Amino acid sequence: MYRDFGTILIAALLGIVMVGVPLLIQKLIAPSKKSFEKFDTYECGEEAEGNAWLQFNIRFYVIALIFLIFDVEVVFLFPWAVVFKELGLLAFVEMGIFLVILIVGLAYVWVKTDLDWVKLKVPYGSGRYRKIKLEEKA
């Protein structure tokens, strides 16, 4: 029984050594010249402009998430279509229910105007985000 644990211990130690030794050799041998070019962000040969810590509009994330949801769901259609004749009527009904759920989700997103890139009405635009005058602060 202890031989099994010994094998695991040897494998773990061998893994640590095989990772640690090359890192240690690289730290000792590699030149270490710190320069602006070395720490600059590489963008396919283009000079970086501005700060990388800027805020993106939430629309980018919402559209990306909606795309991912529907894209991943549509991937299930391809294997089903390949074996459609062999599966029969039950698989057809199940896929119909699946597609109805997808269409209802798409209609919901469409009605909520989450697919619009520019929203004309922002519900919170006139509320707490209005500019505060200096007289109101005092």
Image: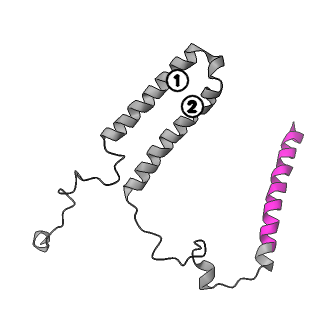
Spot occupied by residue 99 in the image (x, y as percentages of width and height): 47, 28
Residue 123 - label:
none
Q: Which residue is mark 1?
A: 95
Q: Secondary structure beneath disc 1? A: helix
Spot occupied by residue 21 in the image (x, y as percentages of width and height): 82, 66
Spot occupied by residue 80 in the image (x, y as percentages of width and height): 61, 27
Mark 1 in CB contact with mark 2 (< 8 angstroms): yes
Q: Is residue 16 magenta?
A: yes
Label 1 environment density (alpha carbons within 10 Å; few <14, some 14–19, many ≥20): some
Q: Secondary structure beneath disc 2? A: helix
Whole-angstrom CA distance, mark 1 to mark 2, is 8 Å
Res. 134 image quadrant: bottom left
Residue located farthest toward the right when viewing the structure as drawn:
3
Who comes first in sequence, dot 1 or dot 2? 2
Q: Is residue 21 above or below residue 122?
A: below
Q: Is residue 110 above or below residue 99?
A: below
Q: Dominant secondary structure of the magenta stretch?
A: helix
Q: Is residue 102 above or below residue 34?
A: above
Residue at 79% x, 58% y is 16
Residue at 63% x, 80% y is 38
Using the image as rendered, state which of residue 93 and residue 23 is in the foreground: 93
Tell me the quarter of the image containing the N terminus.
top right
Residue at 65% x, 24% y is 83
Q: Which residue is mark 2?
A: 77
Q: Image check: 51 left or right of 131? A: right
Which amino acid does the dot numbered 2 rest on?
Answer: Leu
Using the image as rendered, state which of residue 132 and residue 122 is in the foreground: 122
Spot occupied by residue 136 in the image (x, y as percentages of width and height): 11, 69
Range covered by the magenta-colored residues? 1-25
